[in-house]
Amino acid sequence: MNAADPKHSKLVTPHRLFKLFKYTVYILLAYNIFLWFQEDLSASAETFGDTVTWRNVVEAYSATIDTAAWVLLLLLFELETAVIPDEKLQGGLKWFFTGIVTVCYVFITWAFYGYVAKYGVITDVVPFSIADVCSLVETEWNYIVDLDDYPAIDRTSCVALQGQALLQVSGLEIVGTAASVKSAIGLAIVDIINAGTWLIIVVLLQAEVWLQLKDILTDRLMLISKISKAFFYAILFVCAAYWGFNGTFLDFWDAFLWLVAFIFIELNIFQWHEDNR
């Protein structure tokens, strides 16, 4: 086919390529729900064993619950700001969206509590002393690699742990060096900061959507919101950079995708505001 073929040029346009890229990012974020579930499942098996109930499920599966709620909320933002016309976002559909958004906020806030609770678990440590760490091989004891990685103590790891000052997570058969516990605590703090910052940003975005639907989103309010969100996005960028150096690839990759996804939402709101003007 000739590069100048008009049919080809109509099929491949910058707008369509942009939409393809945008929805690819959304699909990757949805797939991350499965990846976080795998990680939470592995970590909760060592931390909670068979004692996961509805009371502590958010502590065991905080990342999974958080990501699932955010993906649904992202979809709703996309529908409100770029897909469904303003005149149709009324009546029953509006109340349906409001109900779903409210449920998402409940789970996101619940997940935030889960991050705080996980911080409480990993900071509650006591000195652990044993003459021979290798005697714990093939038992129920595990050791801390990072915040969500507690493999069983084996022949290789026991040699590395032998002779070091160890700390035990209170009430659990999990030990770690001072360095590994410190690293896990750092990651737990970043989880809390990241989740709290996203809560603030989504409140600002929801306010913009509400003001736009009421046709009272002025340029001045838009500017104030942009400046405020720029500060909070900078915090999220720092969190992503921290995970890039101290966390797992999934931590960094997920944070990066969310920043890209919400750039799309910001562009949607900007275009929506300009079109209404």
Image: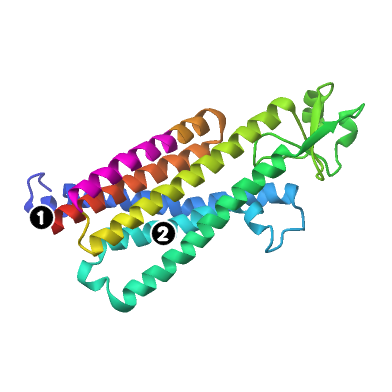
Q: Residues within 10 Å of mark 1 (few under 14, many from 20)?
A: few
Instruction: Give yes or no for residue 68 being in the magenta stretch.
Output: no
Q: Which residues are magenta?
A: 218-237
Label 2 to label 1: alpha-carbon separation: 37 Å
Disc 1: which residue:
7
The structure residue drawn at horizontal position 47% and vertical position 62%, both measured from the top left corner, is: 104
Look at the image and tell me in which quarter the C terminus lies. bottom left
Q: Amino acid at mark 1?
A: Lys
Tell how many labels: 2
Can you give x and y, in whole percent of width and height, for residue 240 in the image? 46, 35
Position above or below: 236 against 69: above
Among all residues in the image, which is located at the extreme bottom?
92
Among all residues in the image, which is located at the extreme right?
131
Position above or below: 185 against 264: above
Can you give x and y, in whole percent of width and height, for residue 208 in the image? 29, 55
Position above or below: 179 against 39: above
Secondary element at image label 1: helix
Towards the viewer: 261 or 206: 206
Q: Is residue 238 left or right of residue 182?
A: left
Towards the viewer: 140 or 215: 215
Instruction: Give yes or no for residue 233 being in the magenta stretch.
Output: yes
Q: Amino acid at mark 2?
A: Leu
Towards the viewer: 150 or 222: 222
Can you give x and y, in whole percent of width and height, for residue 27 in the image? 40, 54
Q: Residues within 10 Å of mark 2 (few under 14, many from 20)?
A: many
Rendered image: mark on residue 136 = none
Secondary element at image label 2: helix
Disc 2: which residue:
73
Can you give x and y, in whole percent of width and height, for residue 47 in the image? 74, 48
Q: What secondary structure is the magenta-colored segment mainly?
A: helix
